Image: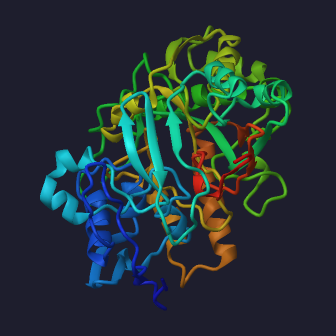
Amino acid sequence: WDVAADTSAVPFTVRDGDKFHTDWNGNDWGEVSAHDVQWSFDDALREGSINQRAQGVQRFVTGFEAIDDRTVRMNIRDNMLDPRWYHIISNTTLGAPVIVSKRLYDEMGEEAANLTPVGTGTFRITEWVTDSNVRAEPVEGHYRQQPSVASYEVILMPEPLARIAALQTGLIHVARVPLKLIKNTTNNIEGARPQVVGPPINQVVMFAGNYWAQTDQNGENIYRTREGFLPDDEHPWIGDPDDAASMERANKVRRALRLGIDRQTIVDEIQSGVGRPLTNAINSFPGDPHWIDAFDVPYDPDQASALLGEAGFPNCFPFKYHVAPGKEWDAEVGGAVAQFWRELGCEVTVDATDYGAARPRLVNRQKQIPWMIQAGTNAVPDAFFSGAYRPSSGFNYGIELPNEITAISERNLDLAATTYVEGVQNTIEWWSYVNNWNLVASVSTLPTSVVLRPEIIEYNPYMNTGPEFVAPETVVMSGP
């Protein structure tokens, strides 16, 4: 691939001889072509798409165009290429669009094709049992690397203790283990070791329901139309931009909840002293180019209580708070946040709904309660773009910033006209707005590791922001 000098397009050359997998019925779907790439991305980015990363790509891509069988061009919206485009569309980010066979969908239809996993990686799927397991076997002669293992199986185990027990018995060879349990787990399995698989995850709480944007990406009016926009006494963290008193009250509530979190204790006690306290969602720490002292959020329960009193809630209030289990953030960290809020007098009910079940409420802009997610992980000072806070189709954090605030970070999309220093200042200016309105309660960074049994003598994953067990082709096992 290459980038056009005016950043109007990124042409890609499709590798010769790269084949789609033979499916589990023995059907051969041939070589990957530029037409498959175009169709896969355009389908994932189509209007109304719920692809996990669609809105992130849509903000700077107008579409893909197959120039010939081996060349596909990614056309850039208004020449504004996201500085991290290569990460956003690749498998180093969780849930990016994948390349699938256009012929498969044309011949089988969408419903059947969705149930027939055909990819291009180093392993082909041979079994997929919903809510149970996925089994795969190596693809012979794959260009990337020939796997050295005979098979590869992923087993669904939502409970951490179940995963640890399976590791100890040898039922599985690798698992994601909660940070505070890694030391004991490796101590109890002779020769076991942790393996980093990605950058530290930024664990944050979004105060959802603050949908303040005036228009969507198509210029259509959306002001005050979102179902989750409920600026009332039952949702006191949601402010009404048409009511100054409402905005002030909601901001005091959100600031109080931010001040009520003891981040250092969470790192020390829940994360066994590993990781860092976090006060923002732009991956900024003291000494970084995009840090200013105003971004600090100390633990101050007395000030938090005073602010709640000023907002009309001297004893806080009851509310739900969503912490999905089994994701890249630590549910126990989320629970600790809830406990600190209870110490302020809040009646907090933790909603442990599975993320997949809850996600449609984010897509449909129905989310209206605080919730935990990762945000800003591995962000760099001059290239931050507020994609998941903008009014667009697809995934969103439950917060839509005013259009003029989104425009601040959009300046960073103009690579040709924006210097490093200007990019850093854009990031600072954008977060200063979010920080002043206390829309996000960041908590801590969470190192991302899996635990390997001693039978795995070599493993070289690429860093991904899932964080997931990736690159199984690099695993080397001991023994015959």
Between 37 and 74, the one lying in front of the other is 37
Q: Quadrant of residue 474?
A: bottom right
In the displayed structure, does residue 164 sit left or right of residue 265? left
Residue 83 percent location from the top left of the image: 55, 71
* Furthest-bottom residue in this view: 5
Residue 65 percent location from the top left of the image: 28, 79
Q: State whether residue 154 is above or below residue 21.
A: above
Identified at 74% across, 37% down, the residue is 453
Q: Quadrant of residue 87?
A: bottom right
Between 320 and 21, the one lying in front of the other is 21
Between 40 and 50, the one lying in front of the other is 40
Q: State whether residue 353 is above or below residue 457.
A: above
Q: How many marks?
A: 0
In the displayed structure, does residue 169 sit left or right of residue 407? right
Residue 181 percent location from the top left of the image: 77, 25
Q: State whether residue 355 is above or below residue 8.
A: above
Inspect this view and state whether residue 77 appears.
yes
Identified at 40% across, 69% down, the residue is 60
Residue 355 percent location from the top left of the image: 45, 31
Inspect this view and state whether residue 266 appears.
no
Identified at 44% across, 56% down, the residue is 96
* Furthest-front residue in this view: 480
In the displayed structure, does residue 163 sit left or right of residue 152? right
Q: State whether residue 400 is above or below residue 209.
A: below
Between 107 and 338, the one lying in front of the other is 107
Identified at 75% across, 31% down, the residue is 179
Colour scheme in use: rainbow
